[in-house]
Image (cartoon, rainbow, N blue to C red):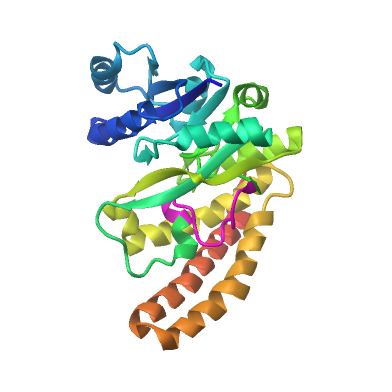
Amino acid sequence: MKVSVVVCTYTLDMYEHFREAADSVLAQTHDDVELVVVVDGTPEVYEQVVDDYGDREDVVIECNDENVGLLESRNRGAAIASGDVVAFIDDDAIADEAWVERLVRAYEEEDAIAAGGKMTPAWVAGKPSFLPEEFYWLIGVTHRGFADGPGEVRNTFGSNISFRADVFEVLGGFDVDIGGRKGDKNLQGGETELCARMREEYGGGVWYDPEAEVAHKVFEYRTEFRWLVDRAFWQGYSKRAMESFVEDEGGEEGAFLKYILTNTTPRRVKRLVSREPLTEIKLFVMVYLLTGLVGFGYLYGTLTYSA
């Protein structure tokens, strides 16, 4: 089974990180991997990629005429890919060497139509003491309470997700109206919307294998309190917006809220008296602060969003 891995990049500031991502794809244990690089409208980056990878038969390189954004770039990468499966990884991530092998196993053994894995944190400037693991999803990392083990889920992160190529084509790829800023509003959730459409069309979700690991670099700015607050608000806004694109969106969010109330709360209350109290108090407060911000963003979306 041939797997095409699409990675999109656009700035020289990220080039060394891109190279680590690309090299991790080319070092996979699975022996039939194609790397598809889409440079999003930056000629100097394209020239550098061609210099470094242009002589490889297992690498395809394209450059958009202008900056069109991540989702449209991913769609272009999938369109020129030649694999039976098209997978996606970001330019700030590093794939475990067995990542593709684990994804292929899901297709061959579980008859999956889509497969993804676990995102682990690679702390660039250290782990923040105030960020609860339940909210690692804000920084693009698989959070506590996501899934107990292998099985079908709604979707995994966009930097660790794959689809049968024919399924992705039938679905028409990512909806390019989702993802990034729309006016002064920051809309997120392209893979969520795509996977919801996939369930409507095929009746199935994404097979999740926690051993199919990709490390996500968590840069310092993503651990700053102000950034996390902003991120939580716009995630809530985006969850409300998803309901305009896909009916019955929100089931997993309800399950997450139930997990916060029935699992996180009693566990963290116990920790208040059994561990470092100051750190645990900060984490406890952050759980409910971030939950409230997501809810506030959802309410704001209810009042203001129009597709």
The magenta stretch spans residue 84: no
Q: Using the rendered view, name the quadrant where residue 132 is placed.
A: bottom left
Q: Label the magenta part by its dominant secondary structure.
A: loop
Count of numbered marks: 0
Specify whether 268 is left or right of 172: left
Q: In x, y percent, where is residue 115?
A: 58, 37
Q: In x, y percent, where is residue 181?
A: 46, 41
Specify whether 223 is left or right of 5: left
**Which is more toward the observer, 248 or 267?**
267
**Which is more toward the observer, 61 or 68?**
61
Q: Using the rendered view, name the quadrant where residue 307 is placed.
A: top right
Q: Is residue 86 above or below residue 263?
A: above
Q: Residue visible at 26% across and 51% down?
A: 124
Residue 187 appearing in the image: no
Q: Is residue 267 above or below residue 27?
A: below
Specify whether 78 is left or right of 51: right
Residue 21 appearing in the image: yes
Q: Is residue 250 above or below residue 204?
A: below
Q: Which residues are magenta?
A: 137-151
Q: Residue visible at 50% across and 73% down?
A: 288
Q: Residue visible at 41% across and 62% down?
A: 229
Q: In x, y percent, where is residue 215?
A: 38, 45
Specify whether 233 is left or right of 26: right
Q: In x, y percent, where is residue 175?
A: 58, 32
**Which is more toward the observer, 191 or 1?**
1
The magenta stretch spans residue 141: yes
Q: Residue visible at 56% across and 50% down?
A: 238
Q: Using the rendered view, name the quadrant where residue 59 is placed.
A: top left
**Which is more toward the observer, 53 or 47?**
53
